[in-house]
Image: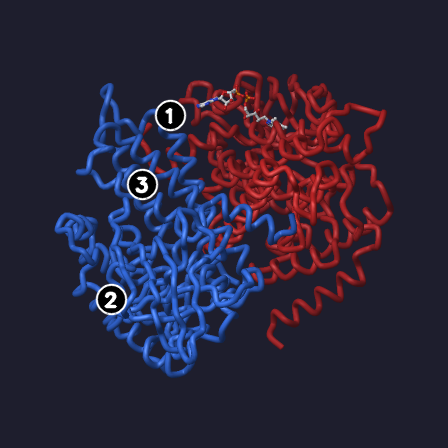
Chain colours: A blue, B red
Amino acid sequence: MTLTLSEEQSFLKDTAKKFAQEKTPTTHFREIRDNENPECFDRAIWQEMAAQGWSGILVPEEYGGSNFGLAGIGVVLEELGRTLTPSPLFATSVVCATILNKAGNDSQKKEFLSKIASGEVTMAFALEEGPRHKPFSINLEAKKDGKNFILNGKKNFVIDGGFADYIIVAAKTSEKEDQLSLFVIARDVEGVNIIPTTMVDHKNAANIEFKNVSISEKNLLGTQNSAKEIIEETLDISRAALSAEMLGGALEAFDITLNYLKEREQFGEKIGSFQALQHRAALMFTELELCKSCVIEALTAFDEGSNDLQRIASLAKSKIGETFFNVSNEGVQMHGGVGVTDEYDIGLYMKRARVAEQTFGNSEYHRNRYAELTGY
Amino acid sequence: MSNLDTFRQETREWLEANCPPEMRKPMTADGACWGGRNFKFTHPDQKLWLERMGEKGWTAPTWPSEYGGGGLNYDENKILAEELFKIGARPALASFGLWMLGPALLEYASHEQKMEHIPKIIKGEIRWCQGYSEPGAGSDLASLKTKAVEDGDNFIVNGQKVWTSYADECDMIFTLVRTGPQEPKHNGISFLLIDMDQPGVETKPIKLISGKSPFCETFFTDAVVPKANLVHDLNKGWDVAKNLLQHERKMLASMGLGGSAAGGKGKGKSGSGLANLSKKYVESSDGKISDEGLRQKIAKSDMDAHAFGLTLRRASEEAKNSNHGPSAATSIFKFFGSEHNKRRYEIMLEAMGTQALGWEGGEFGPEELAVTREWLRTKANSIEGGTSEVQLNVISKRVLDLPQ
Ligand SMILES: Cc1cc2nc3c(=O)[nH]c(=O)nc-3n(C[C@H](O)[C@H](O)[C@H](O)COP(=O)(O)OP(=O)(O)OC[C@H]3O[C@@H](n4cnc5c(N)ncnc54)[C@H](O)[C@@H]3O)c2cc1C
């Protein structure tokens, strides 16, 4: 396994970088936020991303995608993460596309994957039910009723749930804890009550209530009671991809701060000449170098079918979680007063770091998991 | 079969035939082979292994075959390392000549100097030590005062070095000396190779907190050094010094991943060295360490090691085609590797409790006593080869380009 990008991957990364710089710099993010756009993203921009082929990177060619791999979509997410670009790329084209790849039957794949690739539909994955990541403690129930299932329960922190056309729901379908199933549901089905929430990073999520929602068994993804493994694999792929986005955010927060250290003067000198700040900058740089290696390892591990995927995903998510947190907080501190103003971008990264850290398991969660997987 | 497959096959066969059984046993604390005129081999197999590897140039696999090196390219070298790892072969030679001096000579020395010194490094015939630091010149190395004055075909050297590792066991010393006292401090330094087997050179061991005396004060009193032993131009020694330091730091960085028999690294899913060690001393149920605080610390340390290993590998892949030696970025590795190693030993001590606090005898096993001594040794990791603070200075100024 190699830890450097291929020529095609580097090319894609450069294209994404240019796109983010020209079309979605942080001013784009601010515009969406300030216009209180309830969707929290720009549909025209999303169409351009789809036209670039990004929405279909994880979609097989037979369904209109490019099947270019996790490292492919990872480098795009990294560059978009640098400018905090809001888009459905993560929830729709990574999380939900992965579930469909793994669990969908041919007609479901035809219906959904091809529309994901073309940018026609957006999707969200409703998994969590409490304030902390606990993927397998699920109370939402789906009871079999003839050829239908009746869903009752509540989900929270559904990323992109506020606007997604379809929701994939993880539900309990048996008395046994581990027996879970996945369903795909259109947002406007009766009994589905979506309450959009804006998170502190100004991205969209939703709380969703399901009250006697009746859906056909055709909406079941994969076989009944066997979703646990699919969820686990999907989460690991998503963690690797999210780690790439977080790496982009952390690198940008660091660059912004480094520039400030070279510009701002106090006591008649650039503040970057103070050793107390220099050493902290050097520490951050070192941590970022380690994170780069973990992220690329995680992305390529999936593409190359490593048998150590789970540990590597936990490694990446845990390391970048700590580092993004640290770099963005140090960034705010090193900006002084302007660091806590809305006018400067650095604070936006700190907010994003906190939400991303919480998504799909924080650093501590993944240290624990890593220990378990290593046998202690 | 591709060339590389053939190479792997041949390498495997050669190692099978030539690596003696004793050299396939796990390394012990005093099992390293340092070579040199006075080295006492611990086993005949150790001598045989050094001779065979040295003959093939595989103690320095990537150095040019012109000077006795293995002449291997990046991929071949990787294969050799993998095959050596597979049979659990010990390094045939540990030496400052291989890690530090050789690479700098290859870059800066004349052809004659290379012909003279490189083969002897490769075969482990001459053992080298490093004469950089002085009592008044540590982090501020360029303020060194040991002086060399021209005298016909020779230099006459006077002064004192300190912290000279293994000086009392070495044959030759590579030194930084002041040859241009009037020049600005970095511009008056030369790089000299000095034979220690002469009346003008004396060494005096220093005892460390670990109880060992691996290094010395080294005194020069009218020591005589032929001019042929000046590497690079007069007063241009600082260039060589810096280059050599990068190699030293690279070597020290990789030490962060090594470790004692007791607490060594665990590979992949097969487990964690730290965790296995801890389980001998702390409660666990179903293999899970019960002390959650300790468990989190171990996981953090194991993840650091994992991430660090990946980063070293990434750096070597990136350097593969660029053909550059180690750069200032090596400071990242030196810094992280040594700090990580210190943290790792602190965790071992925490897990082992009083069993890791013994000095000698009593109820302590030899491995436990070794951990204690190694723990004390790790405290030097962040000082030797440039302190952690100095590494952070290098990263901020030379890598991040922050203002002076
Ligand atoms: C185990 C070991 C082996 C060694 N082997 C050798 C050898 O073989 N040959 C050899 O020549 N030398 C050797 N050394 C010496 C080593 O290189 C020096 O100890 C080291 O460079 C530090 O110098 P010093 O001890 O004089 O500390 P000082 O330079 O006096 O440092 C004291 C403290 O001040 C800090 N400090 C100094 N300058 C700065 C600065 N600009 N900014 C911030 N903080 C600063 C340091 O980080 C340190 O914490 C060895 C040292 C050890 C511990």
Viewer can see residue A49: yes
Q: In this view, does A29 lie above or below B130?
A: below
In the rendered image, residue B351, in percent from the top left (x then y), is placed at 68, 34
* Residue in view at x 56 percent, y 27 percent: B383
Q: Is residue A250 above or below residue A261?
A: below
The three-letter code of the residue at mark 2 reads Met
Q: Mark 2 points at which residue?
A: A49
- Quarter of the rendering containing residue B278: top right
Question: How many residues crowd mark 2 within 10 Å: few (<14), some (14–19), many (20+)?
Answer: some
Q: Name the residue under label 3.
A: A350
Q: Is residue A263 above or below residue A129?
A: above
Disc 2 to disc 1, how far (Cα)?
43 Å
Q: Which numbered disc flags the more N-terminal residue, 3 or 2?
A: 2
Task: Read off the chain for label 2.
Answer: A
Q: Name the residue under label 1.
A: A275
Asked if disc 1 is less than 8 Å from ligand 1, the answer is yes
Total marks shown come to 3
Viewer can see residue B113: no
